[in-house]
Image: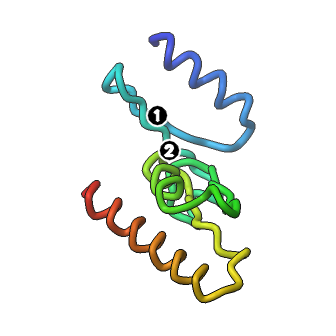
Amino acid sequence: HNCFERKLQKERRLLNGISYSADATSTSHITMKWNTLFTKRFQCRLPILGAPMAGVSGAKLAFETCRAGGLGFIAAGHLNSKEAFKNLEHEIQSFQNLVAAAN
């Protein structure tokens, strides 16, 4: 066992029933996949939710959260005008453009 595998085993014991696996085939990139109710329900690799925060959680933050394996949101609960909804439409389009560019 290498050092990474020993650390994974220790963390698995500490997590007590929450399982995940890691792909350490490349030393420069480690991909983790957790197996929890959250990750199953929302089909993401990590049980991380990027909370929607007015003024800061737009398309770019939502995209990067998703790209990292979590579940990203674009804030919309604070919107109360036509201009605000147009801004939301712009953020959604920006998110879609980021996804298309990444693929």
Query: Dot 1, crowdedness within 10 Å: few (<14), some or many (≥20)?
Result: few
Secondary structure found at label 2: strand
Expressed as whole percent of the image width and height from the top left, the position of residue 65 reads 52, 51
> Residue at coordinates 35% horizontally, 22% vertically from top-left?
28
> Residue at 42% of width from left, 65% of height from top?
95
User: Can you name the residue that lies furthest to the bottom here?
Assistant: 82
Earlier residue among tags 2 and 1: 1
From the viewer's side, name the closer residue of 91 and 40: 91
> Which numbered tag is attached to residue 6?
none
User: What's the residue at 31%, 24% (across, down)?
Assistant: 26
Residue assigned mark 2: 33
**Measured along the vertical axis of the image, is residue 88 above or below residue 70?**
below
Nearer to the camera, 70 or 23: 70
Query: Which quadrant of the rendered structure holds the C terminus?
Result: bottom left
Q: Position of residue 40 (x, y in %)?
A: 56, 61
Q: Is 68 placed left or right of 99 in the picture? A: right
Q: Which residue is mark 1?
A: 22
What's the amino acid at mark 2? Lys
Q: Is residue 43 above or below residue 65?
A: below
> From mark 2 to mark 1, how far is it between C-alphas?
6 Å
Secondary structure type for disc 1: strand
* 80 to 9, vertically: above or below: below
Contact (Cβ within 8 Å) of mark 2 with mark 1:
yes
Image colouring: rainbow
Q: Eyeballing the image, is 103 above or below 75? A: above
